[in-house]
Image (spheres, rainbow, N blue to C red):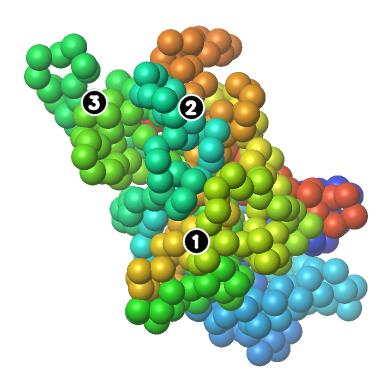
Amino acid sequence: MPPFDVPEGDPFGPHNLPYGVFTIPGTERRGVGVRLGDHVLDAGAAAHALGSPYASLLAQPDLGPLLAAGRTAWSDVRRALTAWVTVPSHRETVEPLFHPLSSVTLHLPFEVADYVDFYASEHHARNAGRIFRPDAADSLTPNWKHLPIGYHGRSGTVVVSGTDVVRPSGQRKAPADPAPVFGPSVRLDIEAEVGFVVGVGSEPGRPVPLGGFRDHVFGLCLLNDWSARDIQAWEYVPLGPFLGKSFATSLSAWITPLDALEEARVAPPERTHELLPYLDDTEEEPGGYDLRLSVAVNGHVVSEPPFSTMYWTAAQQLAHMTVNGARLRTGDLYGSGTVSGPAERERGSLLELTWNGRDPLELPTGKRTFLQDGDVVTLSAWAPGPDGMRVGLGEVTGRVVPAT
């Protein structure tokens, strides 16, 4: 099928147009690509052929220059791309610049500057609290509804979807063990998350207010925060996650611009605590997103977490992580934290789905509590789009390979 003839209802139609970075067989040149159906448009070549003033932003080996260009450029480039793939007069010029998606190699679409991960789902936080603190009066920590809890991760181990994940090794100690031991993790888990990509940086010492979210954040994507629960449990008291998280974070190859998700904006859940002014979004535009996630293990769907239930929004997370004066840089990435809903089928981690290994999952490939070598985990998602269409988010997949 010709690239322009996208089937009606395709979640990657011209209403979506996510950005990625690709190479074609036999070449090493990386270029900015835009997905349309099951094809990739060489955006840099199209911009050059059509005399676009933004050709220099798109003729790059990654998305960095486009991210840094700012909101006006983001909107202008998106309008131009939409015209290039929909206006008949452009067809003769643009059609030869498409490549079948199956024929290209996709890469990490931008250089990750800093990586922060949050803990924004009340359902996930309460489940974790009940698992690890069963005797506590409240499953949430006292600060949870006053601020978005997060930690700084390791940007150098963010990898593109499709990259194998080596089972990490480290120290672990079960409560009854007399001493810690060293070896491969035996409680390897996933966390279904949404990542937000910062385009425009900020000045040191100047917090970004809630209303600045759309001026700084370019788009979003799916993210899998792989977690070694046994390593994490032994190391994280009194500080936060370290080696149990830093070995790998998988990111989609496709970044969906915020402009493609206007119909998916929703109000967050009702707040039960009064927020400090810098986090109070009652007078702001709706800060939530209606994203429908799906988690599959070895091709079998085990969970469908709803992002609309997230207590803390991406705008609040951005405001909180800069309120102390920390600066933003182009390419900063921050994760939402595990997305979990109120139902058992909506839990975004194996920790919750198996209740810390107590209730194994029944899969066609056998029972699972935590991941085994050879398991393949795939995250996918869609959001409501214009005229009843769906906006697809690029999937994230990773296969677990044995420890080295």
Q: Is residue 164 placed above or below 365 in the rendered structure?
A: below
Which quadrant of the figure has residue 59?
bottom right
> Which sits earlier in the primary sequence, circle 3 or circle 1?
3
Q: Where 4 sits versus 157, above or below?
A: below
Inspect the image, locate mark 3, and give the three-letter code of the amino acid beneath it: Pro
Q: Residues within 10 Å of mark 2 (few under 14, many from 20)?
A: many
**Circle 2 sits on which residue?**
127
- Dot in front, 2 or 3: 2
Crowding at label 1, few (<14), some or many (≥20) Cα neighbours within 10 Å?
few
Alpha-carbon distance for marks 1 and 2?
26 Å
Residue type of the residue flagged with mark 2: Asn
x%, y% of residue 50? 73, 84
Describe residue 86's horizontal placement relative to residue 354 as left or right.
right
Q: Residue at x 57, y 80 (%)?
A: 70
Q: Which residue is mark 1?
A: 276
Calculate the distance from the C-alpha at mark 2 to the C-alpha at mark 3: 26 Å
Q: Find out whether the residues at labels 2 and 3 contact each other: C-beta distance under 8 Å.
A: no
**Residue 400 location, x and y as percent?**
39, 30
